[in-house]
């Protein structure tokens, strides 16, 4: 019996029966709206599928040039399509909500296709026991191996979203290529998919996928030397103490998810307060994320402008929160001395250079800092500044003496070593897969073990995904870029004849500093694109030469990117969520002092010493809305870039 045909005929007959109950025009309108809504939902699905396909492709180590067709405007194309279709689909009958009473009949008629779609989709998922397929498990291998010939030629980087892993050289012991700016989870350490966790996989396809991973590793070995040349300068200049991978179950008082500076400062703060039963989990290596990739500036303040901080909290609480960062600068100095951390510290202040020929930009900042925060930044005249920084780009500056710069990864590793010596247990290659309540405590799962803890701290930053959705949805992973030149020797004073670090007054500012081996470390730009090292080197070298054209022949030896976690309100999110999980996230590119503030605040609260400062409660876990939030962030950054460019032209 042709059952499917019978079911379809019965459904049509039922619709005909509805016309006798509601009228033919009403039922026709339902059918028309269902069809139209289905079109928009289809395009929403296409946008999501395109986006996740490209993400899975790169995360599994394939190159974009292996595709027979590549969308030119990715990721903006699918993001734009998603936002446009969502707005049109949901806003079709906004008038029904605008009256004194909601017109529910009109709402039902317009949006009838939505529950119809959800019923079919969820019904299929429940019957087939399907779940979202991870990017690492997408069955890309069978068709791409048939339709693309492996090519070991290095291709220019087109860029991809900040939270998408980019292809790069294989890490020793890994079965797939990894990026210097993306989490590395070797195939041999990945957890197997749970039984029934997703649709059953064809064993032939599974075998093809495993074989493809080996093929991809061989393909990318040819570009290994090139990628090593352009690696993270900080990683190239440290000697790491290896920490074990977690295997089996363990118990602890406090489990910290994230081995960046926020998590490690919390661990060290607990150890210093006598709480030694602490476990730190990192999915990669300690300092892998933004903590070990940044510019190395250490000064007071947050990503949120100081004037905005006062407006948001009022004078008293705003001053109190700013003072915490000043105290954190002193604490960092003290820990460097106390624990003997060799981190190339240059305690010579930081210079804010005025990009615009407008003295009021500096005067307003200096007045605010002196009157509201009792901090005196020293004004530097244009001629005096140009005698030290050999460029015509700057028009005076403000010198902040209570600031310094250093090798951030060396400092992070020093903090980890100090916490470990104090009794904390640090585990690398131990990515948290989930946090669940268990009685009065929590269980944190990893691929090879579990941690049972009385308290959990989430400090995953821009790289953590799928561990604590309530917290993760409150941050946007935004990329920024850094390069390091070759050693300049006697050429360095021809451009920079000063020991301090420098940044400028634009919203999209450059930040840079001279290194002890006469290199220039130069950072800048904010983007939703996490570009490869060649593209980063090209972009930032252009920025460097715009300020110091006399360095035209200088080579870039290191180029890398990293993900910062940003909140919509531009303040760190420090506190405890509704599930009782503590968190320290969203430092927005100003993390060296604020992560220390977070560590001290959480350590004091967990040790029962004092609660988290009240001011942070005003900056809660505000949702960022995923792709829409990333699109808005990129548009905002681009708008500010345009504003700065116009302001420069006027002067």
Image (spheres, grey):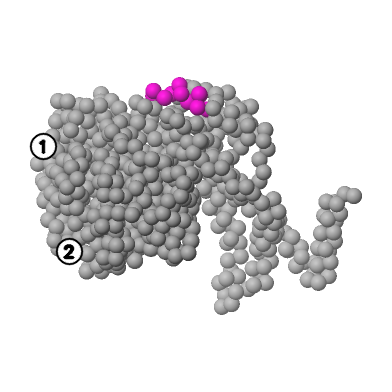
Q: CA distance from mark 1 to mark 2?
A: 31 Å
Nearer to the camera, 229 or 567: 229
Give the residue drawn at x 19%, y 30%.
517
> In the image, is residue 404 above or below residue 208?
below
Answer whether residue 222 is magenta in the image.
Answer: yes
Give the residue drawn at x 45%, y 44%.
247
Question: Which stretch did the figure color magenta?
Answer: 216-226
Give the residue drawn at x 34%, y 48%.
425
Of label 1 and label 2, which has the lower sequence position? 2
Image coordinates of residue 87 in percent, x first then y, are 55, 57
Which residue, given by chain and number where applicable, does mark 2 sit on? 372
Image coordinates of residue 544 in percent, x first then y, are 26, 34
Q: Main secondary structure of the magenta part?
A: helix
Q: Report whether residue 180 is seen.
A: yes
Nearer to the camera, 18 or 557: 557
Image coordinates of residue 535 in percent, x first then y, are 39, 32
């Amino acid at each position: 019996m042709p059952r499917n045909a019978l079911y379809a005929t019965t459904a049509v007959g039922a619709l005909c029966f509805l016309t006798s109950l509601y009228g033919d025009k009403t039922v026709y309108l339902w059918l028309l709206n269902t069809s139209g809504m289905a079109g928009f939902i289809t395009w929403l699905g296409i946008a999501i599928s395109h986006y996740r396909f490209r993400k899975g492709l790169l995360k599994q180590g394939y190159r974009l040039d292996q595709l027979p067709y590549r969308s030119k405007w990715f990721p903006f194309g699918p993001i734009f399509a998603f936002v446009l279709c969502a707005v049109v689909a949901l806003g079709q009958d906004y008038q029904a909500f605008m009256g004194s009473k909601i017109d529910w009949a009109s709402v039902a008629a317009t949006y009838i296709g939505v529950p119809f779609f959800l019923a079919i989709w969820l019904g299929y998922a429940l019957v087939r026991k399907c779940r979202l397929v991870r990017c690492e498990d997408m069955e890309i291998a069978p068709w791409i191996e048939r339709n693309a010939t492996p090519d070991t030629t290095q291709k220019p980087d087109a860029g991809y979203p900040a939270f998408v892993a980019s292809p790069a050289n294989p890490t020793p012991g890994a079965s797939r290529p990894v990026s210097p700016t993306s989490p590395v989870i070797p195939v041999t350490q990945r957890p197997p998919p749970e039984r029934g966790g997703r649709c059953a996989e064809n064993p032939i396809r599974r075998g093809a996928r495993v074989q493809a991973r080996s093929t991809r590793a061989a393909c990318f070995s040819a570009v290994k030397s090139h990628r090593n040349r352009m690696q993270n300068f900080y990683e190239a200049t440290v000697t790491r103490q290896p920490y074990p991978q977690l295997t089996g179950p363990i118990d602890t008082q406090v489990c910290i998810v994230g081995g960046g500076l926020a998590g490690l400062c919390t661990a060290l703060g607990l150890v210093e307060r006598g709480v030694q039963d602490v476990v730190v989990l990192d999915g990669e290596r300690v300092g892998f994320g933004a903590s070990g990739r940044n510019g190395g500036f250490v000064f007071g303040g947050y990503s949120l402008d100081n004037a905005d901080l006062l407006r948001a909290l009022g004078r008293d609480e705003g001053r109190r929160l700013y003072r915490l960062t000043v105290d954190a600068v002193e604490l960092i100095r003290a820990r460097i001395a106390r624990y003997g951390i060799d981190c190339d510290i240059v305690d010579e202040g930081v210079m804010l250079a005025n990009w615009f020929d407008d003295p009021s930009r500096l005067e307003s900042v200096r007045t605010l800092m002196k009157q509201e925060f009792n901090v005196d930044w020293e004004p530097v005249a244009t001629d005096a500044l140009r005698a030290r920084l050999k460029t015509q780009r700057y028009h005076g500056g403000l010198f902040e003496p209570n600031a310094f710069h250093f090798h951030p990864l060396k400092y992070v590793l020093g903090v980890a070593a100090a916490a470990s010596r104090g009794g904390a247990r640090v585990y690398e290659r131990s990515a948290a897969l989930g946090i669940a309540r268990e009685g009065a405590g929590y269980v944190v799962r990893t691929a090879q073990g579990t941690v049972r803890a009385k308290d959990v701290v989430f400090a995953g930053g821009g790289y953590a995904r799928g561990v604590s959705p309530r917290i993760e949805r409150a941050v946007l992973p935004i990329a920024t870029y850094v390069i390091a030149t070759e050693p300049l020797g006697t050429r360095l004073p021809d451009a920079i004849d000063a020991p301090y670090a420098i940044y400028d007054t634009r919203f999209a500012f450059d930040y840079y500093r001279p290194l002890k081996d006469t290199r220039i470390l130069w950072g800048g730009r904010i983007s939703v694109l996490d570009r490869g090292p060649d593209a980063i080197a090209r972009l930032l070298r252009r920025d460097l030469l715009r300020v110091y054209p006399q360095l035209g022949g200088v080579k870039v030896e290191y180029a890398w990117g990293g993900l910062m976690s940003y909140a919509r309100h531009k303040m760190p999110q420090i506190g405890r969520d509704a599930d009782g999980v503590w968190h320290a996230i969203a430092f927005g590119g100003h993390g060296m002092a604020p992560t220390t503030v977070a560590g001290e605040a959480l350590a004091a609260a967990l040790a029962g010493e004092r609660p988290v400062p009240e001011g942070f409660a005003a900056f809660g876990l505000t949702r960022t809305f995923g792709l829409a939030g990333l699109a808005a962030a990129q548009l905002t950054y681009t708008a500010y870039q345009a504003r700065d460019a116009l302001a420069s032209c006027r002067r």
